[in-house]
Amino acid sequence: MLKSIVDLNLCLTMGLNRGVPSVSTKHLILLISLAALWGASFLFMRIAVPEFGAVALIAARVIIAALVLWPFWYFSESPSTRKIALDHWPALTVVGLLNSSIPFVLFAYSMLYITGGMAAILNGTAPIWGAVVAWAWLGSRLSISATIGLLLGFVGVVVLVGDELSVPSEGKILAIAAAAFAPVLYGIAANYTSEKLSGVSALSIAMFSQVTAGISLLPLLFWFMPESMPSTNAWFSLLALAVVCTSLAYLMYFKLLVDIGSTKAITVTFLIPIFGSLWGALFINEVITPMMLVGMLTILLGTALVTGVAKLNR
């Protein structure tokens, strides 16, 4: 099943509109690898957040990621490139908030109550929001196919939420709302990055977005430090989350943003729900329900139509 979806994503991605950067085999490999890493981030958050808490976990995640990225940025970038990045610090701060600190905390909090697979599927609505923001802010045309896709995406979310709330529990409604709102911020951030940071290197964007995210969360640690020392397993999950799923993954993501544009780069979320659900089922015995699959497929279809990856025949 996974191979079929990967092959479908490959065909659809290659069929995007002309007039924008093409997607090479290297870019497709990057997209799939990135989806696997970001899918794993939901697994690691699910393991670590009960012991760290959402704010402390994400603060540590972005700070460690920034420390890992700093030497790569300093020694790889030329003085002129570094100056360009520093000159764009206000926009980089906005990206740090919209694409890291706030949505990361929202997702981490949500996984105190819902599964990583569910959160990953809700994350799959990010391309829909990316296209809606491009239409509302940048004046991109929203076609009939895209409008139908938008409706399908919302239907998929309703199916997911309805299935999850069939067994209500304390805090679950707020957790689902948090996980549903985080992709809205990703959609805004993707368009903002393309619009405001086109002259800034991918490495600079990746590094400074984590720096500014860490700075924004540091004051909150006074109220949200863990009450006891987290376990070795939780620390391992944090390190994997920070180094692999953040430092490495964001280098890949912003590279794709620069090379192929925001609309294509954000299609990485086609595969994140698959990997997020798969890793959760394989490693921590999360249950994938039939309604989750229905909701996921509906969201993916809607996403394909909204972003122009697929079109309805007239």
Image: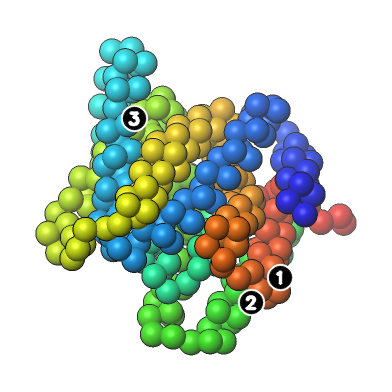
Q: Label 3: few (<14), some or many (≥20) within 10 Å?
A: many
Amino acid of disc 1: Val
Secondary structure of residue under mark 3 = helix
Answer few, some or many: residues within 10 Å of disc 2's Cα (few below 14, many 20 plus, some between 14 and 19): some
| Mark positioned earlier in the residue sequence (1 or 3) | 3
- Judge from the rendering whether residue 164 lies leftward or rightward of residue 89; answer left or right: right
Task: Point out the image quarter for the N terminus.
Answer: bottom right
Q: Which mark is residue 69?
A: 3
Residue depicted at 12% across the width and 59% down the height: 222
Q: Is residue 63 left or right of residue 38?
A: left
Q: Horizontally, is 286 left or right of 79 in the view?
A: right
Percent from the top left, x then y, of residue 186?
Answer: 46, 52
Q: Amino acid at mark 2?
A: Val
| Residue 279 in the image: above or below residue 267 | below
Question: What colour-coding does the image apply?
Answer: rainbow
Q: Quadrant of residue 77?
A: top left
Q: Nearer the viewer, residue 30 or 281?
A: 281
Q: Secondary structure at mark 1?
A: helix
Q: CA distance from mark 1 to mark 3?
A: 39 Å
* Mark found first going from the N terminus, 2 or 3: 3
In the image, is residue 240 above or below residue 285? above
Q: Position of residue 300 (x, y in %)?
A: 68, 58
Q: Is residue 142 visible?
A: no
- Image marks 1 and 2: residues in contact by CB distance under 8 Å: yes
Q: Secondary structure at mark 2?
A: helix
**Which residue is tagged 1?**
294
Q: Which residue is mark 2?
A: 159
Comparing 251 with 150, the one in front is 251
Identity, as a three-letter code, of the amino acid under mark 3? Leu
